[in-house]
Image (tube, rainbow, N blue to C red):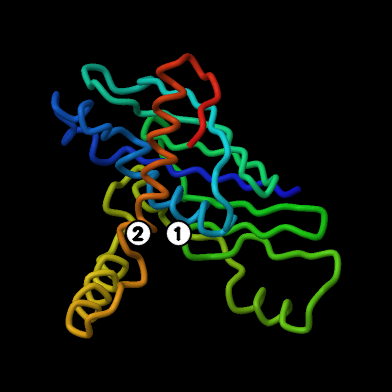
Amino acid sequence: MSVLRFGIVGAGMIAAIHRDAIAALDGALMNQGIHAVDLLQWLVGSPVASVSGRIATLAHEGIEVEDTACASLAFESGTLATLASTTSMWPGHFRTITLGGSAGSAVLADGNLLEWRFRDQDADDASIRARLLRVPGAGVGASDPAAGVDHQGHLACFRDAVQAIHNGTCPQVDGHEARKAVAIVCAVYESARRGGAAVVS
């Protein structure tokens, strides 16, 4: 069994949240954390069996959405995951994704590796650590909402979508694939509405 944990934090975009946002479920998890949730489910590679979650507004008075969310996920493969997404932590922190199991651990921090260690080392492990192991700079959406944010990820998605339309093919991430992360986030919100009770994603 493996455990995956991620967190994304930041102080940005809170001012832009307005009264209609709650209808769109547009708090810290759906707005900022959705990208890490998408990566989490892709890395695990198994459907989510159940979700237990809690949400709260801890640091931003007058908004109708959460600034803090946490959840535990059980995947059909037996993998367990915890997640946290917040805009209530000062001064913020870079996003981390931790993969751990009985054979080793890897920690991704924004675009860098913080750890890459395995019980049985591979011939490429040393070169991977040499190229990618480093502490990241300012985190995405941390105390400075613009820190670490660029347009490259969105640009790649748009280029892929335009190319798929031009070629009459499916994009790398189609609506069916994108829906998986949305379903997980909605399950966290539903569980929180039920007081943390487990719900099926």
Q: List the residue tagged with mark 1.
A: 137
Query: Could you tell me residue 78's position as x and y percent?
Result: 70, 45
Point out residue 39 in the picture as x, y percentages from the top left corner. Answer: 48, 56
Please tell me in which quadrant of the rendered image residue 107 appears: bottom right
Label pair 2/1, CB-CB below 8 angstroms: yes
Q: Quadrant of residue 56?
A: top left
What amino acid is at disc 2? Gly
Where does the image place residue 200, in percent across and percent down from the top left?
A: 51, 32
- The answer to which of 5 and 182 lies nearer the viewer is 182
Q: Is residue 53 left or right of residue 141?
A: right
Q: Residue at image x 51%, y 19%? A: 196
> Horizontal placement of 68 versus 3: left or right?
left
User: Depth check: 38 or 144 in front?
Assistant: 38
Does residue 29 appear to the left or right of 108 in the view shown?
left
Q: Pointer 2: residues within 10 angstroms few (<14), some, or many (20+)?
A: some
Which label is found at residue 148? 2
Say if 34 sits above or below 175 in the image.
Answer: above
Residue at left offset 69%, top offset 65%? 116
Q: CA distance from mark 2 to mark 1?
A: 8 Å
Image mark count: 2
- Mark 1: amino acid: Gly
Residue 14 image point, x, y percent: 24, 34
**Looking at the image, which residue sits at the far right?**
120
